[in-house]
Image (tube, grey):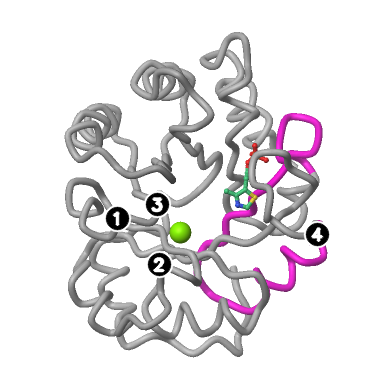
Amino acid sequence: MGGAATQRSPYSFLNLVANWDERLRGIYAIVDRASTADPVALLDAILAGGIRVVQYRAKAGVDRSLVRALHARTQAADAVLVINDDFEAAFDADGWHAGQEDLAGRDLGGVRARLGERIFGVSCGVAPQAREAVAAGADYVGTGPFAGTATKGDAGAPIGAPGVAAVVAAVARPVVAIGGIGLGNLAAVRASGAHMAAVISALAQASDPQERARALVRSWDVPR
Ligand code: TZP
Ligand code: MG
């Protein structure tokens, strides 16, 4: 997995106890409230299609009762659910995904301690941020955009496979690549060394999300 230069976090024992590494693999589906009319229906379809890592993202605000409904479904499917942005809502799911702006001014040791065995994921643009996040106890790191995306207006310029590979080399935790990922470039994402590929529109805009989920999962799992 990651580079030998990585410092082990004082919190990494939590990861070993919870053993998230094994589960943080493959297609990482983001159910984005703004990209789908019916998050529950989309979740059901993608779980039926074989996806086992899910993030719920609701930039206009997270509805905790909806989170609990989503979590019941991911638990029944033996999938993990992390919540973007809203730290308190993470306690109704399996963990929290934070951007750099969500971490500003927070005591990261306190965040890690409060999450306990829950997952702590952090978006990192570049390798030094990723090292810092892992040293603070992050269980996985997100990086991108891998390619051009219309889903996030301020995503910045694509970093491509070399940018993802630099983050993978910097940390000994799973890395999820994000941005403009679909069936057409999934093999390139895999070849970059990323452990997971995050997708929003590739699922939300599919006419048959279950079938698209299955195709993404199969394509990721092709022996290489
Ligand atoms: N962060 C970086 S790019 C992006 C986010 C949330 C959007 C990814 O969406 P899509 O539709 O899979 O390109
Ligand atoms: Mg955020």
Structural crowding at the residue carrying mark 2, measured as other residues with C-alpha within 10 Å and reported as few (<14), some (14–19) or many (≥20): many
Q: Amino acid at mark 4?
A: Ala
State the image quarter where residue 159 is shown.
bottom right
Helix, strand or loop at label 1? It is: strand
Q: Nearer the viewer, mark 3 or mark 1?
A: 3
How far apart marks 1 and 2 lie (CA) works out to 10 Å
Q: Amino acid at mark 3?
A: Asn
Q: Which residue is mark 2?
A: 139
Q: Point out the tag, 2 or 4, that comes first from the N-terminus.
A: 2
Q: Is residue 96 above or below residue 124?
A: above
Q: Amino acid at mark 2?
A: Asp
Q: Point out the tag, 3 or 1, that comes first from the N-terminus.
A: 3
**Residue 54 located within the stretch drawn in magenta:** no
Query: What is the magenta range?
Result: 159-187
Residue 49's disc number: none
Structural crowding at the residue carrying mark 1, measured as other residues with C-alpha within 10 Å and reported as few (<14), some (14–19) or many (≥20): many
Q: Is residue 149 above or below residue 177?
A: above
Please tell me which residue is depicted at 73% across the width and 29% down the height of the picture.
Answer: 183
Please tell me which residue is depicted at 23% across the width and 81% down the height of the picture.
Answer: 110
Q: Quadrant of the N terminus?
A: bottom right
Please tell me which residue is depicted at 45% across the width and 19% down the height of the picture.
Answer: 37
Q: Point out the tag, 4 or 3, that comes first from the N-terminus.
A: 3
Q: Are marks 2 and 4 in contact (CB under 8 Å)?
A: no
Q: Nearer the viewer, mark 4 or mark 1?
A: 4
Q: Are marks 4 and 3 in contact (CB under 8 Å)?
A: no
Q: Which residue is mark 1?
A: 95
Q: Which residue is mark 4?
A: 157
